[in-house]
Image (cartoon, rainbow, N blue to C red):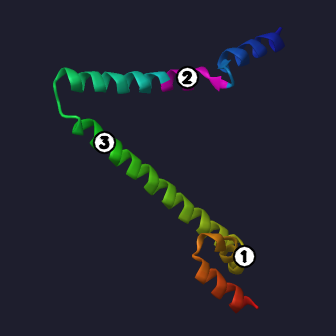
Amino acid sequence: MTGDSNEKTESVVQKRIGGTSILSVLYSCAKKIGAVAVVYLIGYFELSAAWLIGPVILSVIREEWKKDKELRRNIAKAAATRDEKEVILARVDDLPSWVRVLIYVALK
């Protein structure tokens, strides 16, 4: 009996829709409804479109800053755990071609 009740509680706790949890689907829907409500209220109160564009631009800038910060952190972690020469050579493709030539000449 206890095995059946454990399975039922696990299935209730981990209900999924198409591989995603119900809570994540509800959260996603709530975010979209909130965004639509904000757009509607801005139109209702006849505010400028800049009130929509400004936060979007700021959020994009923030996301790009986070990605850049995470990339730098991952590079620092890789440099700390591996040989520095391997880390530099792994990122050679990000450098301009004239720098790559200098690196390959210096390594030979």
Instruction: Decide whether the magenta segment is chiefly helix, strand or loop.
Output: helix
Is the residue 101 above or below the residue 87 in the image? below
Question: For the residues carrying marks 3 and 2, which lies nearer the camera in this image?
Answer: 3
Residue topped by disc 3: 55
Alpha carbons under labels 1 and 2: distance apart: 42 Å
Instruction: Say which amino acid is labelled 1.
Output: Glu
Residue displayed at 70% across by 90% down: 105
Is 5 in the magenta? no
Instruction: Say which amino acid is labelled 3.
Output: Pro
Neighbour class for label 2 at 10 Å: few (<14), some, many (≥20)? Answer: few
Alpha carbons under labels 3 and 2: distance apart: 24 Å
Residue 25's tag is 2
Is the residue 38 above or below the residue 73 in the image? above
User: Left or right of 94: which side holds 55?
Assistant: left
Q: Position of residue 83 (x, y in %)?
A: 72, 77
Residue displayed at 20% across by 20% down: 44
Residue 86's tag is 1
Dividing the picture into quadrants, the one containing residue 47 is: top left
Q: Which portion, as a residue range, is magenta?
A: 20-28
